[in-house]
Amino acid sequence: MQKEWRKGRSVFRKPKWSLFFLILPILCLIMSGCSRKEKETPPAVPSAAGRDSGGLVIGFSQLGSESAWRLGNTASMEKAAKEYGFRLIVENGMQKQENQIAAIRSFIAYRVDVIVFAPIVEDGWANVLQEAKEAGIPVIMMDRLINIKDSDLYTAYIGPDHYQEGVNAAKYLLKKAEELQKDMAENGKIHIVELSGTEGSSPMISRFQGFHDLIDRDERFEVLETVSGDFLRSKGRECMQKLLRKYPGEIDVLYSHNDAMTLGAIEVMEEEGIEPGKDIVIISVDGEQAAIDLLKEGRINCVVECSPMLGDAVMELAQAIVSGEDYPRISRPEEDCFTEYDDLSSLEPRGY
Ligand code: GYE
């Protein structure tokens, strides 16, 4: 459309007057046709529940595509929306809060029935959520939590318990410690390095807290350093490289807040001749297929599950909210913890 318009303008620049008057009426006709067409495009002010197709229109602000977890989560939302006959408008925030805020504003302007968002960080959402509230649009927070004084600014939360995930990681380590201490009799301490997720995000904060609440009070452990790998495989690799240089031969345990970073860290260890799972005990979070495969091979010791398959539950929740039924304000899926001590032979394919 834009290209056609530019072409039109170049005709105007070098006019041949006779030709001009001949084509003027034709041009006018075309232009009025165009503008009428524009006016005919609905300004997107639909009524609430059930536009043309009868299904809900859901605006979904996804925070990015940094990991297999995230891709699995987006796919789960898309699949579920289709099954429910809902129209899902997905906006990828590309790891930037301002993009997510802009997306939520566009959903408000579009007057979607429900807004779903996975907040990249905990702080900074009050204004845009106030706008959604004033517009009367329910907001479902998915996956991550936010830090907000007025909790009425969102309608419901659905997502994993990231604090419990940190606790699960620590519980595995407490069990493993018995075995480790026999090998480390000389200096007694078990040295841990931690790759944490995106700064200021709720899984980073809670996975840190859950783990440290159990580990820090136990004198057998020492956390050498916690560094943020931003939930990215590339940064996991980069950070692990630095840690291995800084603490040569000293690291006993890696606790990594997600599988993507773990995979990057394992790559580096192997390049440096370190055997992951043996020379360094590896604890990871998420449970994507690649990590489970490494766990089965003995190259990871523990994978704390965090399921991204939230689509069905989100759609069900959205439907209940819009139709005025009772709905749970907070729902959390059941999660497991897979370790080297478990029989994983009958574990179903993970799907992410
Ligand atoms: O663990 C990680 C993703 O918010 C729980 O985000 C999610 C985390 C997940 O990038 O892989």
Image: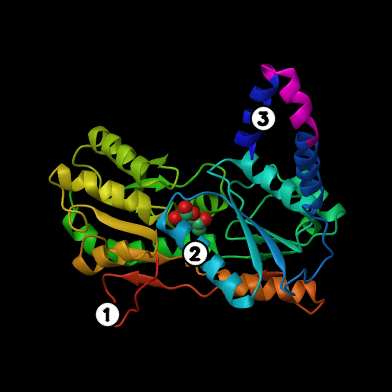
SS for callout 3: helix
Q: Which residue is mark 1?
A: 343
Does the magenta-highlighted stretch encompass residue 268?
no
| Frontmost residue, 341 versus 323 | 323
**How far, Cα to Cα, is label 1 from label 2?**
29 Å
Q: Which numbered mark, 1 or 2, is in the foreground of this view?
A: 2
Rendered image quadrant of residue 27: top right
Q: Which residue is mark 2?
A: 75
Counting residues from the start of the chain, the first of labels 1 and 3 encountered is 3
For residue 173, say whether it is visible: yes
Question: Disc 3 designates what residue?
Answer: 8
Disc 1 versus disc 3: nearer the observer: 3
Left or right of residue 243: residue 18:
right
Percent coordinates x, y for residue 200 in the rendering? 57, 43
Give the residue type that dot 1 points to.
Asp
The residues bearing labels 1 and 3 have C-alpha atoms spaced at a distance of: 70 Å
Examine the structure image and report whether residue 18 is included in the region drawn in magenta.
yes
- Which corner quadrant holds the N terminus? top right
* Amino acid on which the number 3 mark rests in the picture: Gly
Residue 339 picture location, percent across and down: 31, 70
| Residue 72 horizontal/vertical position (percent) | 46, 63
Mark 2 or mark 1, which is nearer the start of the sequence?
Answer: 2
Q: Magenta residues?
A: 13-25
Q: Is residue 221 visible?
A: no
